[in-house]
Image (tube, helix red, strand yellow):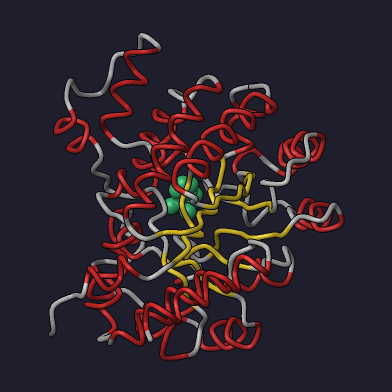
Amino acid sequence: MPEFPSDFVRALPKAELHVHLEGSVDPATLLVLAERHGVEPPAPDEAGIREWLRFDGFASFLERYFFVCDLLRDAEDLARVAEAYLRTAHQQGVVHVEFHVSSSYHIVERGADWGEVLGGVVDGCERAERDLGISSLLLPDISPHLGAAAAERALDVVLSEPHPRVVGLGMGGPADNWATEDFGAVFRRAREAGLHTVSHAGEHGGAWEVRHALDEFGAQRIQHGIAAAAEPDVLAQVVESGVACDVCPASNVALAAVPDMASHPLPLMLDAGVVVTLGSDDPPLFHTTLLDEYENAWNLCDLDRRGLTMLARNSLAESFAAADLVAEWIADLDSVTG
Ligand code: ADE
Ligand code: ZN
């Protein structure tokens, strides 16, 4: 297999549409935050933190993910984390990031003031945009494990503080209650309020989740969606809908959603005609970066430079950024690739 053209991919203007703000905390920042809040870190140094970030499935991941969430306590923490990730993304040629922000964690579980959370994240986004020109938008998400009533409450709070960077509602986090509670009404209300709607689906759960997210949530993008590959009818529905799947191969391996990288269904999804964008999900937690995900796709799917360019183009075209910006980025992409 030819060597992965990393400089070529770095030079492609691209967007990252599937990355969790709370999951973007790198080990150095984790140590700073723990110190700042007088919390005993899980290990004394970065190497130890990296070792701690090994999981044997979704449950052990969530335990550590919530440890990290708990370190994000005030506006400055959130600004620091948002800015730090945008700087990292910029170094990889990313021109636009859509951060999933665990709004139901901050609002319902932590009882935080959403205005303060949002203010902090926006400050971080603005600092990065001012310094580097990188664009960013926010997708507050609701978590099914807290139930539909809590999701409604989180949405109420999100809608009470409209902000031009808040452009959509997502769903992620522990999947309990996915099958038993009706979250469709929350998404309908979000759409009526002018938000886009996206959802995690078919990550650890079956293909039916993907169908449900399309039919009941009106999802305009699906995070992961990999289980659709196992059900021809659902795969056909995804292709027919044109709804993109924001796929994160390293996350799927780290959380044992697939047995190993070689078994990842990304090639099948691309061959079937699914619109795919690549994301890194919770990159430092999974020891990955967006560029690594392009390399994973290169290795898995036997892509050439046109294939890599198509993935970058999808990420721009499927973003919720303003149409004139998207057109500019795509023109830049065309000029880079000739
Ligand atoms: N929140 C952060 N990472 C997640 C993942 N991999 N799946 C669902 N929710 C998440
Ligand atoms: Zn995710």
- From the viewer's perspective, tell me whether residue 144 is left or right of residue 53: right
Quadrant of res 12: bottom left
Q: Report whether 101 appears left or right of 191.
A: left
320 versus 108 height, above or below: below
Image coordinates of residue 249 in percent, x first then y, are: 33, 65
Farthest-out residue, top? 38
Q: Could you say where residue 69 lies in the image, as x and y percent from the top left?
A: 46, 30
Rendered image quadrant of residue 269: bottom left
Q: Quadrant of residue 4?
A: bottom left
* Placement of 220 over or under 288, stated as above or below: below
User: Residue at (62%, 84%) from the top-left corner?
Assistant: 237
**Residue at 53% over, 48% down:** 99
Residue drawn at x 44%, y 66% is 14
Please name whichever residue, 194 or 87, is drawn nearer the observer in this view of the structure.
87
Image vertical order of residue 167 relative to residue 272, above or below: above
Q: Is residue 235 toward the left or the right of residue 153 in the image?
A: left
Residue 324 drawn above or below residue 313: above
Which x, y percent locates residue 133?
49, 50
Q: Quadrant of the C terminus?
A: bottom left
